[in-house]
Amino acid sequence: MKEKFEQLKNKLNIELKETQNAQTLEDLRIKYLGKKGQITDLLKGMKDLTVEEKKNFGKLINELKTQAVESISKRSEELKQLEIQREIDTMPEFDLSIESKQNFGSYHPITLVQRECERIFTTMGFNVEDYPEVVTDYECFEAVNVPKNHPARDMQDTYYLENGELLKSQTSAAQNAILKKYSKQLIEDSMPIKAIFPGRCFRNEATDASHENTFFQMEGVMVDKDISISNLIYFMKTMLSEVFMRDIKVRLRPGFFPFVEPGFELDINCLICGGDGCPSCNHSGWLELCPCGMIHPEVLKEGGIDPEKYTGFAFGLGLTRLAMMKYRIKDIRDLNSGSLKALSQFTEDK
Amino acid sequence: MFLSMNWIKDFVDLSGLDERELIAKFSLSTAEVENDIYFKGSDISGIVAAKIVSVEDHPDSKKLHLLKVDIGEEQLVDVVCGAPNVRVGMVTAFAKLGAKIGDVTIAPRKLAGYTSNGMCCSEKEIGISDDNSGIMEILDDITLGTDLKDIYEIDDIIFEVDNKSLTNRPDLWSHYGIAREFAAISGRKLKEYESVELSKYDNLKKIDLKIEDPLCYRYSCLQFENIKRTISPVNMRIRLFYCGMRAINFLADLTNYLMLELGQPMHAFDSRKVEKIRIKRFENEFDFTTLDGIKRHIDPDTLMICSDNTPVAIAGIMGGLDSEIVEDTHTLTLESATFDATSIRKSTVRLSHRTDASIRYEKSLDPELTVKAIARFVYLLNKYDENVKIVSSLTDEYAYKYPKVTLNFNKDYVDKYTGISIDNDTIIDTLTKLGFKVELNDNNFTVDVPSYRATKDVTIKADIIEEITRIYGYDNFEIHTAKAPLFPTRPENTKKDEDNIKDILVKRYSLHELHSYIWNNVDNQKEIGIDNVGVIKLKNATNPNIETIRKSMIPTLLCEIKQNIGFSTDYGIFEVGRVVSAMDENNMCVENKILGISLYSKTMNTRDLYFRLKGIIEDIFEELKHKKVEYKTNAPEYNFEHPTNLNEIICEDISLGKIGIAHPSVQNKIDKRAAVVFADIDIDKFCKINNNSIQYEEPSKFPSIEIDLSFISSKFEPIKKAIQNVQCPLIKNFEVIDIYEDKNFKSIAVRLTFSDSNRTLTKDEVTKVSDKIVEDLKQNGIMLKS
């Protein structure tokens, strides 16, 4: 009897080694341990034995059964490991030189530059304002000290609408409204006016690589009791250094703009050569960047602010120009081209 | 405007100073100097005065001559010359051996068999005029062999000032005015302007003159005769040429010279043609031929100089052909006048004819200049032609005098405005150098503005700040931040919402932001069959293709979709831009800030693409406002809108925009095999919607029960209503989980989720609710699918 047991045990162990997957292992379990399995059959043959024999025999069978269960579960573990190894072995090595398909959206480059400027000014305590594109003659000209017949009106070719309104030719068109909006806080709460207003401007002119009839500017104003030319230079230098992320040298030259007195043309040292002179800056070392100045007393007055008590500065930064400089865009027309080949390149830019 | 340093140095002694550096300073203190500075004469040397002693024809050449020239040395020089104007006795410019003209060094050279030991030069060759018709003829009496640079101002530094930067400075349209700036910048003294005393002619007859129009501020004139000189002195011609003008004849050159020197345009008439000078406008239109031979149309707004009733010149712009100086002109009338700047500017625009004179007049010239210019003119006339005889007294009508400008301010004002401290002496010195009269009492300044700055330029005390600071130098400013109190900034909702919308569209949905124009592009729209719809047009568009202001942003987007169809099989674009949607009761534009989105797909069907767009919109409302969107079908307004599935986007009963499908006729023109959908949302209205703050609800610790119901219905709307109508607080959520559709019917499967935060729900109480919903729907004819 014992020999029969041993034989069965050996046979099981041999067959176990031959099993290569979960299914054959399960078949094997049924063959030995199932209801009609070979070990189960042994138990069935016990009914003819004596009590004493049954006792001994039963103990042996149970031992055999336990051993079989253990062997099967051990083999099952081995097979799982083999399966994982097989998965590892069959995994091919990928060709990483094949590019992954991307699906990025994109911002308009003006949005990126505008956000950057807004961030800088917000950190310096400026409010960001919004303004319409269709404005009145008063807003665009009269309120900012450009009366009718002023030659400055000839300098800008303005788009007029049939009803006498116009498409704003400069962001200064918003100055009067901004001054009025905050003048009460300035006078009553001593809260300085600090605001920027980015916006789209329009000029009735022929377009080419460096001229567009539709472009973006960003106007900035600061008004308080003792705002000076010295402050203006400081703010311009600080702001432009932030925009270009390096220490920028600025220089002011007299410039004539009716809404400021004195008015300046602000130059920065050339970003490409640093000021030594190169083709980009026409070998001068300087780039003309933005008009600015001390707000003209008439403009303050028109905004409800007493120019004897308050002074302020204003500047007009060309956002379109800035975007072109930053991304080295050579043709201004690309910006409004609607071409995704050109404009889908401007993914988030941190 | 070109400026000559030699000319400037007539009026201010700059010896010992670096002129280039001064020009750079001028650019920083006064007006923008263009980058290129010209060093005239620097490329020529060794050009001397030489006399032609003999001229022989070349035996083999019709053009060439064999000359012997005297260059003041012992030996005559043999020269071969091709100029047509050679003659014995002529003194000319001669490039000696070793002389340099540009890159060429003069060396002995064989020409048609004869050696030429030097070269006779034309004025063009030595760069002092554009005359290349023959060799230069020197009329002045000079020692042979003298280097021409020693007697003529061939060496000069010429720089160009950007005219635009002189717009508000009528005084700077002249060398004398510029010299005043150089004096202030360099700290040197401006010299007196040499001229004659015109009062000595007071006993001569007056000219018949009458200003009959307020547009003429001052008219001064003088008559003279017997001008013998025809060619201007060489130095005068060189200066005119270097400054961009051509020498014509002595008289014309002299008026031009005065204009460049003092800024006052002048004109000389044949006195026979202007017997009674009248300045006026005419009631009728007429044609008038100017001295350039062009017939010009004169309207009733154009101011004319007349002889009684016959027009002889367009005031401030150009003289007439009929009154021009001719060969037999005996007596000349010299005009020096001032006119209304705006009138001149507008006339030049109407005539489309700007002249050197009108450019100056439109800047508001100082009327004080008229007599000063005549006095200088007479001074130069006498200097260069002793035969000239003055035959009238100075006749001068001064109709409009600019008011005298006096400004008062104190030192505190200057300190506050500049932010630095500039001492009183510097202030006084600077202003005095610029021609202002300054008085100081106890830190209080009283400043008289000189007439040449008082026509419009300097009117308020802030203008004085500019005068002080620009000469002080902005580079010398100590810079510091403002001492302003700090307050928190309050970002406007509009800005925040707009930024967030863009972020959602770009980052979550990979859309592309584009910019377009505020007007419809008729050609582009026509290409895809979209009508040109707008409520207002531009008045002065130069191109009729782009004159209608857009009423909707969608046409622009659809044109861009068409433009980019090769970009990808699937893409979406958006723009935040403006439209004019209507005119208000005052006929003012109603402008709206609009978000427009359009999606294009070759891989999705129209329904799926539409739902993608619908999802994007709902996402924007959900995320930024925590609000749900409702829809209402709408009838098409434009021909690009598909009549089916055009829906208004509604939130809190406010209509914010539309979502729709491109009309098949438009879509086929864009791309037959693709789906195109669009939506627009009014950003300003969107921003006004209150943001529902987040209401935190603690998750229930008890299990929830889900019940799935499937109804036979073509629409979800009634099912949704029925669920909402039972108003059961236990229903935490409901959603469509399946839609089945075949030829016979459509069914919609809904999953209801029930839960309570305090207890486990029983099947019974939940079934009761769902049974009620089923019952309600049954009443409306919507059956449960068996």
Image: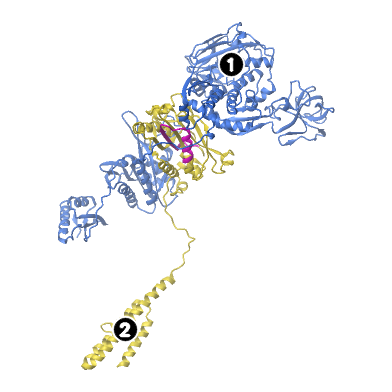
Mark 1, residue position: B372
Query: Which contiguous range is marked in magenta?
Result: A211-239
Residue B14 % position (x, y): 64, 27
Residue B424 % position (x, y): 52, 26
Q: Chain of mark 2?
A: A
Q: Which quarter of the rendering shows the N terminus of chain B?
A: top right
Mark 2, residue position: A68
Mark 1 → mark 2, Cα distance in angstroms: 129 Å
Quarter of the view holding residue B236? top right
Residue at x-position 26% and y-position 87%: A41
Magenta includes B652? Answer: no
User: Does the rendering let one see residue B731?
Assistant: yes
Left or right: A32, with A99 as reference point: left
Residue A310 % position (x, y): 41, 30
The kind of residue tagged 1 is Lys
Q: How is the image coloured?
A: by chain
Whether A96 is drawn above or below A191: the answer is below
Magenta includes A224? Answer: yes
| Rendered colour, chain A | yellow
Q: Which quarter of the rendering shows the C terminus of chain B?
A: bottom left
* Foreground pick, A256 / A327: A256
Q: Chain of mark 1?
A: B
